[in-house]
Image (cartoon, helix red, strand yellow):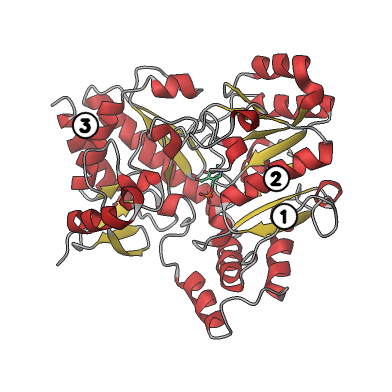
C-alpha cells in the first residue's frame, strides 16, 4: 500500500506544493496531508483506510454528506448522453429558475465554473454598470483568486501569510479599497471621501475565510443603505453561505437584499460550478444582451447542472436548515463545555450550517485583527490531535467548519469525545 506520506512526496515532484489548492497542503500543521480515496456520508476514508468524521465537506458543497445517492444517480442518468455540448440545454433553465425561486433578489442568473469566476464577473458587471472603477472589500474576506479581490484576502492567502499576492499590478490593486470587517463607520468615511468613484461593495455576509465571523448587528443593513445613497452596487458573495446558512442564503437569514449575489459550492453539488445573478436591470448588461463580456466553454455543463439541481431540491425539505443548525449548536456547545472543563480558552461562533473555533480569551471575534490575535499554535495542536482520533477539521485556523445532514448524533459524540481528550493534552 502506498501511504499518504509517500503519495504526497510523489505529488510534490510534479505539482507545486503537491496540491491543486494551497490550503490542502496542511502547511503550518506540521503533518503531511491525508490522501483521500473515497467518501461516504459524513466520512472521508484515506488511502490507509482510516475513517474520519469530516467537517470540511469539500469546503462546503457536501451539505447532505458525501456521495449523496440521489445526486450521484442524477449524474449517472445523464452520463451516457455526453459530457458537454457547448449549446443551450433545458437543464440550464431548470437551474436558473430554481435559483431565482430560492433567492428572490435574483431575477436573472449566469452559470460559471467556480466561485472565483462568479465574483470576478460580478465585479466586472458592477464596474460596467456604474461606469466606476473602485471596489470596496473587507480585510480577511476571500472572494477567490481574481486579481482585483486578492488584496488582503482570507483563506489560503491568509494561511500562507500572503494577504496580497505578487503578480497583481499595483495599478489594479489601487482600485480595491480594503476596510475592516464589521466597521460601518470606516465604510461611511470611505464613501464620504470617494463614494462617487465606487462601483460596488463586495462582502461575505458571514465571513467564512477568516474562521467564522458573523456580521455585527446592522452591518449588512448599513452597507445596503450606503450603496443606495451613492448609487453603488452591493454584491453579496454567498459562495459559502448560499443555501447553507438558510435555504435563501445569508440575505434571507439577515433580511438584507443585495443587488448582485455570487454563488458556488452547494450550487454545483460537488461539481465545478459557480453563478452570479441579480436584478433584471443589472444582469441585462451581460453579453450577449448587453456590453459587459462574460463567457465559458463549459459553463452550465449538463452533468454539473444535474448534480446541483438535485442537491438544491433536496434542501427544500421543510426543517432541513433548522436541523442542520441544531447539529452545529450541539457540536459547538459541547466543544465549549469540554474546553472550559479542561481550562482551555476557546470560543465558537456559528451561523446555520457553518461554525468556527477560536483559541482566545476574547468573548467575541469580529474582524481580521482579532482573528490573527488568536492562538494559532493551540489550534495546530488541537487539529493534529483530532486528526489522530479520526476527526477531520479544516487544516487552518482561518477556515470555517461545515456540518452536513449526514452527521449523526454518534458522529458528533465521537467528535466531542475526541475533543475532550485533545483539550486535556493541549498544554503539553
Ligand atoms: N467566495 C467565497 C466566499 C469562497 O469561500 C470561495 C472559496 O472558498 C470563493 C469565493 C472562490 O470559490 P472557488 O474556490 O470555487 O473559486
Which residue occupies 20% across, 40% down?
A: 385
Q: Quadrant of the C terminus?
A: top left
| Residue farthest along the bottom direction in this orientation | 80
Q: Is residue 225 in view from this perspective?
A: no
Q: With 312 as the anchor, is 210 left or right in this view? A: left
Of 60 and 29, which appears nearest the observer? 29
Q: Which residue is mark 2?
A: 122
Label 3 residue SS = helix
Residue 43 screen position, x and y as percent: 32, 59
| Residue 10's disc number | none
Q: Is residue 80 left or right of residue 391?
A: right
Comparing labels 1 and 2, the label whose residue is closer to the camera: 1
**Residue under label 1:** 294
Spatial distance from mark 2 to mark 3, Cα to Cα? 43 Å
How busy is the neighbourhood of tag 3: few (under 14 within 10 Å), some, or many (20 plus)?
A: many
Separation of residues labelled 1 and 2 (CA atoms): 10 Å
Tell me if residue 107 comes above or below residue 145 in the rendering.
below
Q: Which residue is mark 3?
A: 423
Residue located at (61% from left, 51% from top): 117
- How far across and how far down the image is residue 9, in percent? 21, 54
Amino acid at each position: 500500500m502506498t501511504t499518504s506520506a509517500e503519495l504526497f512526496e510523489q505529488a510534490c515532484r510534479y505539482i507545486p506544493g503537491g496540491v491543486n489548492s494551497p490550503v490542502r497542503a496542511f502547511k503550518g500543521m506540521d503533518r503531511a496531508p491525508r490522501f483521500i480515496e473515497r467518501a461516504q456520508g459524513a466520512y472521508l476514508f484515506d488511502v490507509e483506510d482510516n475513517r474520519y468524521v469530516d467537517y470540511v465537506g469539500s469546503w462546503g458543497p457536501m451539505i447532505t454528506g458525501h456521495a449523496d445517492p440521489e445526486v450521484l444517480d442524477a449524474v449517472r442518468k445523464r452520463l451516457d448522453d455526453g459530457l458537454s455540448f457547448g449549446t443551450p440545454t433545458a437543464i440550464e433553465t431548470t437551474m436558473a429558475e430554481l435559483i431565482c425561486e430560492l433567492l428572490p433578489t435574483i431575477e436573472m442568473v449566469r452559470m460559471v465554473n467556480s466561485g472565483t469566476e462568479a465574483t470576478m464577473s460580478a465585479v466586472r458587471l458592477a464596474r460596467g454598470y456604474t461606469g466606476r472603477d473602485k471596489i470596496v472589500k473587507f480585510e480577511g474576506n476571500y472572494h477567490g483568486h481574481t486579481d482585483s479581490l486578492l488584496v488582503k484576502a482570507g483563506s489560503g492567502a491568509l494561511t500562507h501569510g500572503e494577504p496580497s499576492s505578487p503578480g497583481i499590478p499595483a495599478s489594479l490593486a489601487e482600485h480595491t479599497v480594503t476596510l475592516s470587517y464589521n466597521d460601518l463607520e470606516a465604510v461611511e468615511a470611505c464613501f464620504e471621501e470617494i463614494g462617487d468613484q465606487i462601483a460596488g461593495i463586495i462582502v461575505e455576509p458571514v465571513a467564512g475565510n477568516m474562521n467564522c465571523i458573523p456580521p455585527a448587528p446592522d452591518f449588512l443593513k448599513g452597507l445596503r443603505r450606503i450603496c443606495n445613497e451613492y448609487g453603488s452596487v452591493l454584491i453579496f458573495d454567498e459562495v459559502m453561505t448560499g443555501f447553507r446558512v438558510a435555504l435563501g442564503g445569508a440575505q434571507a437569514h439577515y433580511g438584507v437584499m443585495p443587488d448582485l449575489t455570487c454563488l458556488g459550492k452547494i450550487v454545483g453539488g460537488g461539481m465545478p460550478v459557480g453563478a452570479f445573478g441579480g436584478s433584471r436591470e443589472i444582469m441585462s448588461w451581460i453579453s450577449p444582451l448587453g456590453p459587459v463580456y462574460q463567457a465559458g466553454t463549459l459553463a452550465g455543463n449538463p452533468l454539473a447542472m444535474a448534480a446541483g439541481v438535485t442537491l438544491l431540491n433536496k434542501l427544500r425539505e421543510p426543517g432541513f436548515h433548522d436541523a442542520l443548525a441544531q447539529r452545529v449548536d450541539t457540536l459547538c456547545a459541547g466543544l465549549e463545555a469540554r474546553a472550559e472543563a479542561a481550562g482551555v480558552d476557546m470560543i465558537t461562533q456559528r451561523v446555520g450550517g457553518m461554525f468556527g473555533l477560536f483559541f482566545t480569551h476574547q468573548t467575541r471575534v469580529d474582524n481580521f485583527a482579532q482573528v490573527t490575535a488568536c492562538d494559532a499554535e493551540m489550534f495546530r495542536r488541537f487539529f493534529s490531535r483530532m486528526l489522530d482520533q479520526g476527526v477531520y477539521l479544516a487544516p487552518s485556523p482561518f477556515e470555517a467548519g461545515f456540518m452536513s445532514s449526514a452527521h449523526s448524533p454518534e458522529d458528533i459524540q465521537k467528535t466531542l469525545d475526541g475533543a475532550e481528550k485533545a483539550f486535556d493534552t493541549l498544554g503539553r
